[in-house]
Image: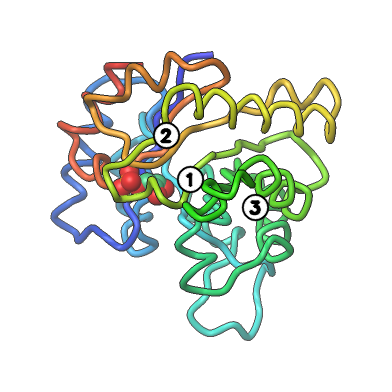
Amino acid sequence: MPALIVGNWKMNGLGEDIAEIAAMAGSGARAVWIAPPFTLIDRAVIVSAGAVKIGGQDCHAKDKGAHTGCVSAAMLADLGAGFVIVGHSERRRDNGEGDADVRAKAAAGLAAGLEVILCIGETREQRDAGQTDAVLSRQLAGSLPDTAEGLIIAYEPVWAIGTGLTPTLADVAAAHGHIRTELVGRFGSAGHGVRILYGGSVTPANAGELLGVAEVGGLLVGGASLTAQSLLAIAAAA
Ligand code: 13P
């Protein structure tokens, strides 16, 4: 399985930035996915012409209804999106989303035919208190959907996001190994097939060594995914 490089644009990107996605799509790079803001998904799907998979950064747990300002997984699929990110720590922090919400969103994404990138990760305080494995186990127990089919996990230590800090490679290996054990415990042999991404301050400079860690099946990239130049340099490391 080639490593998967996923760019999460967060609340960044105006119409002019579609050129970056067009450049990524035109590069011939394989296994590059981008989650632009909702407002750019339609245009991103068109310019990427299938070469870059486009996805959403979140979805509602319901298909439709009286939920002002929300976007459903069915709506994302209708636009031609191929995946959705759920449970990002910024959603958990800014929107009070808990594991049960994340589980419902993951189920909605899978039901809509999307691949689902489910994010988990510990805070600095939890790591310092030696609780990393316990936190990851709790988040997985509360948020995993019923099936492994279409599921991807992203391990994103909260303290590594946007800070320039990354865990040691040994700590990344330990966390990913723990997540794999939990996935196999939950899904049996299908748990071996679930890809596990690392995210948090990934750059062109550290991508290669992170991708060399056991059980790291790809990277979820924030700031360094905003330009084709930077994201393609990360993809080249894959
Ligand atoms: P940065 O790469 O900017 O640290 O963000 C990581 C992230 O949150 C991706 O979802």
Residue 109 spot, x, y in % from top left = 64, 52
Q: Which residue is mark 2?
A: 167
Compute the Cα span from label 1 to label 3: 23 Å
Residue count near mark 1 (Cα–Cα under 10 Å), binned few <14, some 14–19, many ≥20: many
Q: Is mark 3 within 8 Å of ligand 1?
A: no
Which residue is at 46% across, 52% downward? Answer: 158
Q: Which residue is mark 1?
A: 157
Specify the amino acid type for callout 3.
Answer: Gly
Image check: 116 left or right of 50?
A: right
Q: Are marks 1 and 2 in contact (CB under 8 Å)?
A: yes
Q: Which residue is mark 3?
A: 109
Image check: 22 left or right of 58?
A: left
Residue 32 spot, x, y in % from top left = 37, 30
Q: Are marks 2 and 3 in contact (CB under 8 Å)?
A: no
Compute the Cα span from label 1 to label 2: 8 Å
Specify the amino acid type for callout 2.
Answer: Pro
Specify the amino acid type for callout 1.
Answer: Pro
